[in-house]
């Protein structure tokens, strides 16, 4: 097998008339990759909203910024993976579809340190001191 065919995107021309199973497998793989891309997009939006809220501790905000940077890199890498597997056109369609359809509702409540205390009670550090607790 030549390298050109071996590394060709999984398109209709490449698959040919091998079997309907191959087309179903291709469609399933593409749908799975789109779902993963959508989940990354959702995480990016939510993390960015969380990081930009004014109620986070400075050290936690820097962690969120680092997480956000990593999520964006994974998002770009996933688009590249889709392009290498299914072709650039499919990757651009998947990206546009995900960016058009994935959102986080405005009314979705973000957890802040004070809201966590209200909902779950005082933290272990507040309850037992900086040394924690012993059994």
Image: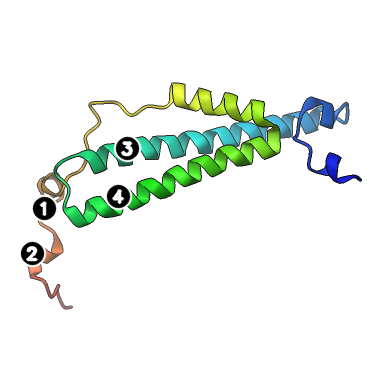
**Residue 82, percent from left and from top:** 63, 37
Report the Cα–Cα distance between label 4 and label 3: 10 Å
Secondary structure at badge 2 equals helix
Q: Could you tell me which residue is drawn at 30 percent across and 39 percent down?
A: 48
Disc on the earlier residue, 2 or 3: 3
Q: Could you tell me which residue is drawn at 68 percent across and 39 percent down?
A: 84
Disc on the earlier residue, 3 or 1: 3
Q: Which residue is mark 2?
A: 127
Report the Cα–Cα distance between label 1 and label 2: 9 Å
Asked whether the residues under the numbered discs 1 and 2 touch, taking CB atoms below 8 Å apart as contact, a structural biologist would say yes
Disc on the earlier residue, 2 or 4: 4
On screen, 53 above or below 59?
A: above
* Res. 99 image quadrant: top left
Q: Which residue is mark 4?
A: 64
Q: Which residue is mark 1?
A: 121
Left or right: 101 with respect to 52? right
Left or right: 94 with respect to 56? right
Q: Which residue is mark 3?
A: 46
Report the Cα–Cα distance between label 2 and label 4: 26 Å
Q: Could you tell me which residue is drawn at 52 percent across and 24 percent down?
A: 96
């Amino acid at each position: 097998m030549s390298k050109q065919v071996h590394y060709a995107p999984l398109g209709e021309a490449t698959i040919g008339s091998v079997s309907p199973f191959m087309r179903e497998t291709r469609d399933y793989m593409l749908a799975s990759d789109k779902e993963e891309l959508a989940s990354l997009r959702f995480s990016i939006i939510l993390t960015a909203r969380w990081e930009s809220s004014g109620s986070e501790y400075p050290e936690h905000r820097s962690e969120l910024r680092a997480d956000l940077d990593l999520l964006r890199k994974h998002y770009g890498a996933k688009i590249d993976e889709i392009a290498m597997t299914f072709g650039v056109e499919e990757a651009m369609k998947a990206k546009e579809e995900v960016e058009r359809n994935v959102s986080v509702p405005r009314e979705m409540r973000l957890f802040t340190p004070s809201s966590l205390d209200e909902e779950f009670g005082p933290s272990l550090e507040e309850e037992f001191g900086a040394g924690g607790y012993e059994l």
